Image: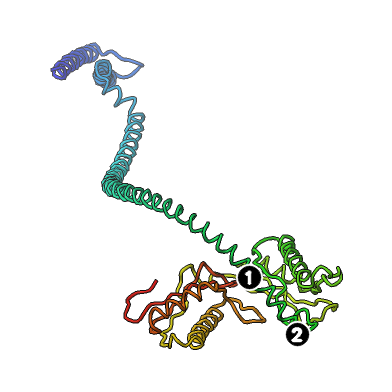
Amino acid sequence: MYGLFLIMVLVVVGGAIAFIGDRLGSKVGKKKLTIFGLRPKHTSVLVTILTGISITTMTLAVMTTVSDNVRTALFGMEQLRQTMAETENRLAYASKELENSKAEQAKTDATLAQTRKDLDQLMEQRRELEQRADELQRGNDALEAAKAELMAENNNLASQNQGLADDNAKLVNDNKQLEDRNDYLTTGIQIMREGDITFRAGEVLSGGVVKCGRSTEDTMNDLSVLTDMARENIAHRLGDKATEQEKQIWILQSDYEQAAQIISESQDDMIVRIVSIGNLVRGEDVRTVLQLYRNKRVFNDGELIATKRLHVNVNNEEEVDAEITSFLQEVNGIATQKGVLPDPISGNVGIIEGEEIYNTINDLRAARGNATIYAYAKGACEVFGPLRVRLKIIASGVIGAF
């Protein structure tokens, strides 16, 4: 509607200007008027041109006044083009950013989907772990109950073991007294048989177990204790009349230091023996050498060592004694093979009480000479020994032994 009104205004104004121009041209032609000294004909043409210019100028003026678009088309076209170019650039940049945003969103959606998948897996693992934890807790409760039961049983066994230990201590003390008496008698017999020989070659003057893995200084202190024990044994052997010179023993310092180093670097406790080098007559220097052995458990308490079937005439004491002596020699040989150190002089590794042999002979007689004899370790035995033996007779036809 606004455009139609503008057209009508322009038509009216243009017509009015044309009419005015025509009237001016007619008057100029009739009156033969001139402008700028021109001929009337040329003046008429000039009036016509000015009329056209006026129409055009008026048209442009009206359109410029009433229309922003006309003003922009006439005076702001370059700026409009620049603005359009900038707008197009911004539109292209915005489109590119939109594409990038869509790509990022796609990546984000993929990451979110993977994260949700991982979360589901983690939740499943969590449920499995919780179930496993419940199972472990139930197992732990069962173990705790079993532990409490074992502790109660262990306390009961410890009480019984203490009683057995007290009895064993008394038996050990009795046995020690018998051993001392036997050593004394053996020494007397050797002196009577061998005259002035005080110590025989290979005779052990002292021995003991030295702990491993300690400093060389501590180890040498233990070796010094064994040396003092050897001197005391020498003094006991020689009697009250022994001189200080006779009590001294000779050990190479290099052997002494080397033994201390070996024991300190060892992973196992070591048995150390101070042994006489040769037969020594009273008054001679007591020359000795150190012997080292790795200590370990050879027999456990109650462990079966040997067994043998016997068929003897119980009325023949010599035959009975010979069979039992032969069996004890077999036990001695087995113990030696398994690592128990024998006495260098006698070759024996064990100790058996006279009462044990007496009871064994009586049991063999009760079985009428047809039986199986068993030898068990009486207490744990290590390489250092001695091996204490318990004998058991089971008559033929009787099942089981303990």
279 is higher (above) or lower (below) than 235: below
Q: Secondary structure at mark 2?
A: helix
Mark nearer the N terminus (2 vs 1) = 1
The reply to whether residue 106 is visible in this rendering is: no
Q: Position of residue 178 (x, y in %)?
A: 62, 69
Q: Type of residue at label 1?
A: Glu
- Nearer to us in this view, 180 or 302: 180
Q: Position of residue 400 (x, y in %)?
A: 34, 74
393 lies left or right of 185: left
Q: Residues within 10 Å of mark 1 (few under 14, many from 20)?
A: some
Which quadrant of the structure image shows residue 263? bottom right
Q: Secondary structure at mark 1?
A: helix
Q: Which residue is mark 1?
A: 179
Residue placed furthest toward the front: 315
The CA distance from mark 2 to mark 1 is 22 Å
Q: Type of residue at label 2?
A: Glu
- Nearer to us in this view, 389 or 135: 389
Q: Position of residue 289 (x, y in %)?
A: 75, 76
Q: Which residue is mark 2?
A: 194
